[in-house]
Image: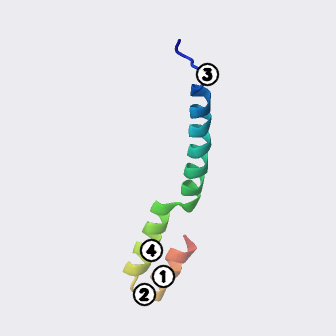
Amino acid sequence: CVFLPNNGTYFISYIVIATFISSPLELLRLPQLAEYIYRRIRAKTKLEKQQIIKK
């Protein structure tokens, strides 16, 4: 038997955990945040900083 009765809870748990972990991580947008911080640090003039903020 491929589909055992106890396997259903495993897959449901996996889907629920994957949903609650991946959604907040996607909302954080870590690569964009890292790029923003890097560009803010590298900006030298006020004009460059204003252009970064507008993006």
Q: Between residues 43 and 37, which one lies in front from this camera angle?
A: 37
The disc, 2 or 3, on the residue closer to the chain's N-terminal end is: 3
* SS for dot 1: helix
For disc 3, the neighbor class at 10 Å (few under 14, some 14 to 19, many from 20) is few
What residue is rendered at 57% in x and 74% in y? 54
Where residue 49 is drawn, which disc sits there? 1
The disc, 2 or 4, on the residue closer to the chain's N-terminal end is: 4
Say above or below: 46 vs 40. below
Give the colouring mode of the picture. rainbow
Marks 1/4: CA distance? 11 Å
Disc 1 residue type? Answer: Lys
Say above or below: 17 vs 51. above
Residue hosting label 3: 5
Say above or below: 52 vs 23. below
Q: Position of residue 39 (x, y in %)?
A: 42, 74
* SS for dot 3: loop
The mark lying in front, picked from 1 and 3, is 3
Disc 3 residue type? Answer: Pro
Marks 4/3: CA distance? 50 Å
Marks 2/3: CA distance? 64 Å
Residue hosting label 2: 45
Please say if the residues under marks 1 and 2 sit with CB atoms less than 8 Å apart.
yes
Please say if the residues under marks 1 and 4 sit with CB atoms less than 8 Å apart.
no
